[in-house]
């Protein structure tokens, strides 16, 4: 049960409710922007801080990894101490750490700052969807509010590269982190007045062992995926510890699931997954985000390092897709009144698959026009699937379980961002390392940098004589594009798999 303070009644009036929603969208936009903004700043950061391939991936992964690992825990803290209170604490910490990240002198400090951003970001997200459900008790208004919420996620993910590109055009790379400060100021100033407080009056005890094991379990699994994909299985001294971490991670997650099923007050209510529509929608949510983040990871580098666009122009190339996502996410609210939501969800996933299929077919000639078209289809599907999957997730469980359902939905989103980079992004990097041909005569440092990442090869090529630099650049770009083919094929398969699961689950429900 959730209790509302007197402010909730005021926020429940139509005008005040929409003002409250507008404020709640600020952390949604911020967290989703931070998922993708670093991808476009990555070439600049790579050239200046010179991280190796593993550190480069950790820069992107650690934020979503920490955030996803702590969402369920922070959701429990919000239930106990107040969702609005946790939201404001997280916003304060996020703003402070963003300044630290902006002025990080080393790649390692930037990774640490990104981890801290994930910690405070986890305080921001569990509150938003749960508060929206309380502010909008009417089903139709709630669906529209959730559509706007989902659109904010999609828009933030798409605006990340655009904002990053615009800032990098005029400022150092640290500016992409400082953007958090002006976004969070309105939340900190207006949030206490517009957003109603809500919390569980009778929460169960916080399960500390589950908190620790869930975090370490996920960390071990993702670390194993990243390390094994990057280093392979050649040297036992390298892959042995990673494999052991992966096994321990799987054991930890299995223990966590078993403990939740036996607990009277579980940290994560695993029984919700017994409901077919809920599970299918979570899977659709998860896999669509895996695909989106993987696309942005490779296309941001392709636009800048292969096609030679500036960060700002590269970001603007993705602007049509962002607008399509907004239109499809909001437009599907009316369509859902005429057609079954699960059918529209299926259409959205098929559009995602079609977009990646186009990218696979055109992988040898991914021009600006080709990217605009493929990203347009991808975002059209993302807009449909994100709105409908979140609506089905919230509405397919009992009202008392809405908070737990929201936490699981947000965890799926953030874990999808982790897996999108940690798996598909790492596969792309692995193919690059296997295919690139580094010319002889380079220093050890230059050879290592060029062989690790496309950004490193571009930086090294600028230090070489024209013919040697051109040869290195051509080899590096060809190696990168070979990995793009594997990435787009895998993403197409994932979207089709999600579509099949949705079709099978809802078809069975109709035949009962």
Image (cartoon, helix red, strand yellow):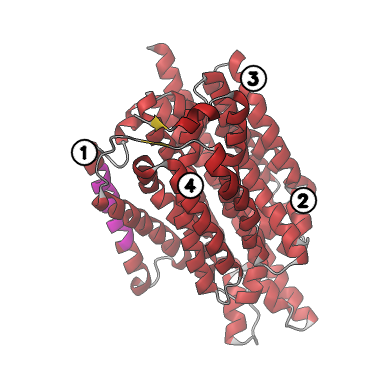
Please give the range of residues in magenta: 245-257
Reply above or below: 196 against 426. above
Binning the other alpha carbons within 10 Å of mark 2 as few (below 14), some (14 to 19) or many (20 upward) gives many
Horizontal side, residue 275 vs residue 430: left or right: left
What is the CA distance from the residue labelled 3 to the residue labelled 4?
31 Å
| Mark with earlier residue (3, 4) | 4
The front one of 403 and 252 is: 403
Q: CA distance from mark 1 to mark 2?
A: 49 Å
Question: Does residue 411 appear anywhere in the picture?
Answer: yes
Q: Which residue is mark 2?
A: 316
Quadrant (top left/top right/bottom left/bottom right) for the N terminus:
top left
Local secondary structure at mark 2: helix
Mark closer to the chain start, 1 or 2: 1
Which x, y percent locates residue 190? Answer: 59, 44
Among numbered discs 4 and 1, the one appearing first in the sequence: 4
Mark whose residue sits in front, 4 or 1: 4
Instruction: Give above or below for 221 relative to 49.
Output: above
Whole-number angstrom distance, CA of label 4 to CA of label 1: 27 Å
Kindly report the secondary structure that dominates the magenta region of the rendered protein: helix
Which residue is disc 1 drawn over?
A: 263
Q: CB under 8 Å between callouts 3 and 1? A: no
Position in image of residue 443 (x %, y %): 61, 87
Quarter of the view holding residue 171 = bottom right
- Mark 3 or mark 1: which comes first in sequence? 1
Q: How many marks?
A: 4
Mark on residue 87? 4
- Which of the numbered marks, if any, corresponds to residue 334? 3
Q: Is residue 56 magenta?
A: no
Secondary structure of the residue carrying numbered label 3? helix
* Helix, strand or loop at mark 1: loop
**Distance of label 3 from label 1 (alpha carbons):** 41 Å
Towards the viewer: 34 or 372? 34
């Amino acid at each position: 049960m959730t209790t509302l303070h007197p402010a909730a009644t005021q926020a429940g009036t139509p005008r005040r409710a929409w003002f409250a929603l507008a404020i709640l969208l600020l952390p949604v936009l911020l967290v989703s922007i931070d998922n993708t903004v670093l991808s476009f700043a990555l070439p600049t950061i790579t050239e200046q801080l010179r991280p190796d391939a593993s550190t480069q991936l950790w820069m992107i992964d650690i934020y979503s990894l920490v955030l996803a690992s702590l969402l369920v825990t922070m959701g429990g803290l919000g239930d106990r101490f107040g969702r609005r209170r946790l939201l404001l604490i997280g916003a304060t910490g996020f703003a402070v750490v963003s300044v630290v990240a902006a002025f990080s002198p080393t790649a390692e400090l930037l990774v640490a700052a990104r981890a801290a951003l994930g910690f405070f970001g986890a305080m921001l997200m569990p509150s938003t969807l749960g508060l929206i459900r309380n502010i909008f008790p009417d089903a139709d208004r709630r669906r529209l509010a959730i559509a706007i919420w989902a659109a904010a996620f999609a828009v933030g993910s798409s605006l990340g590269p655009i904002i990053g590109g615009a800032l990098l055009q005029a400022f150092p790379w640290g500016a992409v982190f400082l953007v958090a400060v002006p976004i969070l100021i309105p939340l900190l100033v207006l949030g206490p007045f517009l957003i109603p407080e809500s919390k569980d009056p009778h929460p169960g005890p916080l399960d500390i062992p589950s908190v620790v094991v869930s975090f370490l379990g996920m960390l071990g699994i993702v670390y194993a995926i990243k390390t094994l994909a990057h280093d392979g299985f050649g040297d036992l001294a390298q892959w042995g510890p990673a494999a052991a971490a992966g096994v321990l991670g799987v054991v930890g997650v299995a223990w966590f699931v078993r403990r939740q099923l036996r607990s009277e007050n579980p940290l994560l209510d695993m029984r919700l997954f017994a409901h077919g529509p809920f599970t299918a929608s979570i899977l659709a949510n998860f896999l669509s985000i895996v695909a989106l983040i993987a696309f942005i990871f490779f296309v941001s580098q392709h636009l800048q390092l292969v096609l030679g666009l500036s960060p700002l122009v590269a970001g603007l190339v993705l602007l049509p897709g962002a607008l399509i996502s907004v239109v499809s996410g909001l437009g599907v609210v009316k369509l859902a009144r005429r057609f079954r939501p699960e059918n529209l969800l299926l259409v959205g996933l098929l559009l995602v698959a079609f977009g990646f299929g186009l990218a696979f077919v055109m992988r040898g000639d991914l021009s600006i026009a080709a990217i605009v078209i493929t990203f347009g289809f991808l975002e059209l599907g993302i807009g449909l699937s994100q709105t409908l999957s979140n609506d089905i997730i919230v509405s397919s469980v009992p009202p008392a379980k809405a908070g737990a359902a929201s936490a699981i939905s947000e965890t799926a989103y953030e874990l999808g961002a982790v897996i999108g980079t940690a798996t598909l992004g790492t596969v792309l990097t692995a193919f690059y390392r296997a295919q690139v041909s580094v010319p002889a005569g380079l220093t050890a440092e230059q050879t290592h940098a060029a062989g690790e990442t496309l950004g490193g090869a571009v930086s090294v090529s600028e230090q070489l004589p024209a013919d040697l630099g051109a040869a290195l650049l051509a080899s590096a770009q060809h190696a990168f594009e070979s990995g793009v083919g594997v990435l787009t094929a895998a993403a197409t398969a994932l979207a089709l798999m999600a579509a099949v699961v949705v079709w099978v689950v809802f078809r069975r429900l109709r035949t009962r």
